């Protein structure tokens, strides 16, 4: 036997993300049903008409009545794969969409009790609106078929009409789950691309594949067949496959790692897949070429430069602003930009600079460089405060202070001599009297 499910599903797939609680007791979920009417036109081409209507996923048992009788109801009955086990978070964060599913020319009967050759398939995709997870469940519906289906004709040309208020009883046959619906990661990281699945029976045959879609090309990354045991590529732990975990681990991300990673598992006649877009983003290192305070003399010119270095992807927005001492903002300054520098690791650097020749009125102004980039939730700010002095007034104060110091020195030097002279005259006068 290749898979066992009861305790395994509960242990691996029913755990909440970040400790959140599963919605195992959910009774029903509002959905959008995207129906398809397919026919062959006069030119012998296939045409499809899409009809979107409100629908409900209802959980119960065979024979239950619809809780919403005026809209299409998909009644999901008990099976070894309960899709509610994989739903987490608040119910109002769940986005549900139901589609028909064509098995194409694969005529394999699903290997569970009660399955028929004329079974009709649907998929229910449920996403968490904040990107917590995405699930895709294959729902098997056994129709009452008074006439055997035409084996030579495609199944989508034989689909029965579904109307508002119809109730379709079905069971979950296969579930796909990813807790990384999309990935944003920096350079030189090793992220795990989460992909798991489960079916409602012991599984002897399955094919697992990972591909990378980039610029219209698909690259094979990994493949495994349980029928032959043959493996090509790496990135998936073979021991984990037996537990339904086919997650892929990247090695040291680079700018070449960007693209859409496609996880697929084929269990005939079903082929489930998840597209996981991966984007590389590296935050810029921002600096300015002066400290927190810049002192300048009136008439001087200073180049002010703001550097944004080692960021990815390319687009970055650098602006210089200034504020008056009372905090009043002014329009962005007119600046020049250097040409972009591309580094060997694929990151970029650029500078925004301007030349400042301040007036006395600008003393106390605050100058700020703002850098915005896709990798940042909010811009990075670097600032300095300007102090401006008048060189003429400075020289006047220096000359004045120098004059005062000189006068003090002269006075201090002359005073002892003056006092000494007066003292000598008094002595001579006294000597003259005595004589």
Image (cartoon, rainbow, N blue to C red):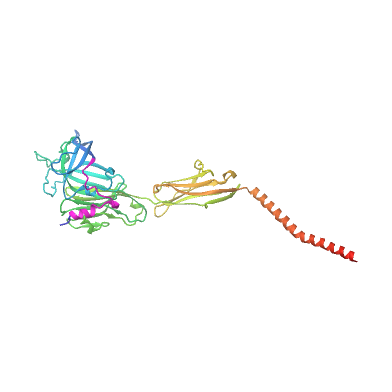
Check the image and name the residue furthest to the front: 434
Relative horizontal placement of residue 117, taking residue 427 as reference (left or right): left
Q: Position of residue 417 (x, y in %)?
A: 79, 61
Q: Read off the magenta span.
A: 6-30
In the figure, residue 96 lies in which quadrant? top left
Q: Is residue 127 magenta?
A: no
Relative horizontal placement of residue 426, taking residue 372 as reference (left or right): right
Q: Position of residue 276 (x, y in %)?
A: 29, 49
Relative horizontal placement of residue 125, taking residue 328 as reference (left or right): left
Q: Position of residue 75 (x, y in %)?
A: 17, 42
Q: Nearer the viewer, residue 432 or 340?
A: 432
Residue at image location 54% in from the left, 51% down from the top: 293
Can residue 154 be seen here? The reply is: no
| Quadrant in which the N terminus appears | bottom left
Can residue 194 be seen here? The reply is: yes
Check the image and name the residue furthest to the top: 42
In the figure, residue 46 lies in which quadrant? top left
| Quadrant in which the C terminus appears | bottom right
């Amino acid at each position: 036997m290749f898979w066992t499910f009861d305790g395994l599903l509960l242990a691996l797939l029913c755990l909440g993300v970040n400790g959140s609680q599963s919605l195992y007791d959910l009774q029903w979920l509002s959905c959008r049903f995207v129906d398809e009417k397919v026919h062959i036109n006069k030119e012998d081409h296939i045409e499809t008409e899409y009809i979107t209507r409100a629908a409900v996923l209802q959980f119960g048992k065979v024979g239950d009545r619809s809780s919403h009788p005026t809209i299409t109801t998909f009644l999901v009955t008990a099976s070894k794969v309960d899709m509610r086990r994989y739903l987490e978070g608040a119910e109002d964060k769940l986005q549900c969409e139901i589609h028909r599913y064509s098995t194409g020319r694969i005529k394999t009967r699903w290997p569970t009790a009660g399955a028929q050759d004329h079974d009709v398939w649907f998929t229910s995709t449920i996403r968490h609106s904040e990107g917590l997870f995405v699930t895709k469940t294959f729902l098997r519906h056994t129709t009452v078929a008074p006439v055997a289906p035409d084996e030579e004709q495609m199944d989508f040309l034989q689909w029965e009409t579904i109307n508002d208020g119809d109730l379709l009883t079905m069971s979950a046959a296969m579930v796909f789950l990813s807790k990384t619906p999309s990935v944003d990661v920096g350079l030189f990281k090793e992220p795990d691309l989460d992909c798991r699945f489960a079916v409602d029976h012991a599984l002897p045959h399955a094919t697992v594949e990972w591909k990378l879609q980039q610029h219209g090309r698909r690259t094979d990354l990994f493949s495994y067949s349980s029928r032959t045991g043959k493996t090509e590529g790496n990135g998936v732990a073979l021991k984990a496959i037996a537990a339904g975990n086919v997650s892929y681990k990247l090695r040291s991300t680079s700018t070449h790692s960007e693209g859409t990673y496609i996880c697929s598992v084929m269990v005939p006649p079903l082929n489930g897949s998840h597209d996981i877009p991966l984007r590389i983003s590296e935050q810029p290192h921002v600096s300015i070429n002066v400290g927190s305070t810049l002192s300048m003399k009136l008439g001087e010119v200073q180049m002010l430069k703001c550097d944004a270095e080692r960021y990815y992807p390319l687009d970055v927005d650098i602006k210089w602003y200034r504020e008056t001492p009372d905090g009043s903002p002014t329009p962005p300054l007119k600046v020049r930009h250097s040409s972009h520098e591309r580094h060997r690791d694929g990151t970029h650097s650029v500078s925004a600079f301007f030349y400042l020749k301040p007036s006395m009125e600008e003393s106390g102004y605050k100058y700020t460089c703002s850098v915005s980039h896709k990798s940042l939730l909010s811009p990075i700010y670097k600032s300095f405060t300007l102090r401006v002095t008048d060189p003429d007034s400075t020289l006047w104060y220096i000359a004045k202070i120098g004059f005062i110091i000189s006068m003090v020195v002269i006075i201090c030097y002359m005073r002892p001599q003056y006092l000494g002279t007066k003292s000598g005259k008094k002595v001579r006068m006294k000597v003259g009297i005595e004589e």
